[in-house]
Image (cartoon, helix red, strand yellow):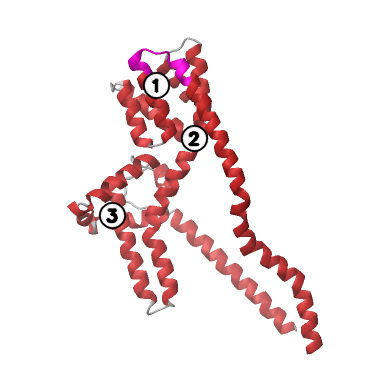
Amino acid sequence: MKLQIYIYCASLATAGAIFCIFLWFTDFVRKLSIDKIELTEEEQKEIPILIKLMLPFKLNVMFIARSNSFDFIRQVSRDQLLMSGFDQVLDELDFVASKILAVIFGLLCVVASFFVLSPIYGVIVGSLLMFYPSLWIRSVIKKRHLQIMKALPNILDLLTLSVAAGKDFLTSLRDITARRENDALNEELTRTLHEIQIGKKRSVALQDLCDRVKLSDLTTIMSAVIKAEELGVSVGDILRIQSDLLRSKRFSLAEKMANEAPVKILFPMVIFIFPVVFIILLAPLAMQIAGVFK
């Protein structure tokens, strides 16, 4: 009995040591500086660790990323970087090169698993590595679009009040963005204001905003503002109508997500919660039955 207790304590100590080593390793990789990437410290923190580790090797596969057969992939990557807000941090060629390197490293991981570990683990790890850049950029885009959708009705309300009070549309937009926290929508609107300040036409800058974000709600609102400017219609009335429509749509989306919550929580309950409950309830009974037969 004492030997089992010692073995159990030793196992817990070993697991704790491995966990501490893992935390130290992740902290070391997070602080890893790559001299070949000309990024600020803030931008380096935003880029995932795996992509930061791949970028120093981008010159080895840059000829593949620049080839004509990768024109479509470069265009898709450019659009994804614009939608995610990483276009000023990562170039599309660098991102395509990181995708190519991820595929190469994933294939090497799969091949190495046939000689070291079980092939099934190598296939799983290699597949995750190969698709990691695409999965990461899609998750960033989804999160950014969700932030914009949440902040858009409040922005419209403030714009409506400011325009109704007699301010110009651009002046109202500049005052609101200066007082809000720097979220995804505020970042895009600030960028649009800077483009207008350097001489770009307002309708063109608003259209470029829609082309960057590619969010249907934002595109509808900005298109209405552009049409109102062209036709001479009051921008305040357009903003009020769009704000009411967007708020109704957000309420409908919230109701839909609330109705989907019970279905989504069913899978984690079956996999993680129910087995633990069964173990707690049936383990004492199983031990008593085993003692009787023993």
Q: Is residue 176 magenta?
A: no
The answer to which of 21 and 4 lies nearer the viewer is 4
The CA span between labels 2 and 3 is: 32 Å
What's the residue type where badge 1 is placed?
Val
- Residue 84 in the image: above or below residue 202: below
Secondary structure beneath dot 1 equals helix
How many tags in the picture? Answer: 3
Q: Earlier in the sequence, mark 2 or mark 3?
A: 3
Q: Name which quarter of the figure residue 62 lies in.
A: bottom left
Left or right, 53 with reference to 68: right
Q: Residue 170 location in percent, x, y?
A: 40, 18
Dot 3: within a 10 Å radius of its alpha carbon, few (fewer than 14), some, or many (20 or more) residues?
many
Q: Residue at x 79, y 76 (%)?
A: 285
Inspect this view and state whether residue 128 appears.
Answer: yes
Secondary structure beneath dot 3 equals helix
Q: Residue at x 44, y 21 (%)?
A: 173
Q: Residue 73 location in percent, x, y?
A: 27, 50
The CA span between labels 1 and 2 is: 18 Å
What's the residue type where badge 3 is placed?
Ala
Label 3 sits on residue: 97
Label 1 sits on residue: 225
Inspect this view and state whether residue 36 appears.
Answer: no
Left or right, 160 with reference to 68: right
The CA span between labels 3 and 1 is: 39 Å
The answer to which of 229 and 20 lies nearer the viewer is 229
Q: Earlier in the sequence, mark 3 or mark 1?
A: 3
Q: Residue at x 33, y 70 (%)?
A: 108
Left or right, 46 with reference to 19: left
Point out the image quarter for the C terminus. Answer: bottom right
Label 2 sits on residue: 149
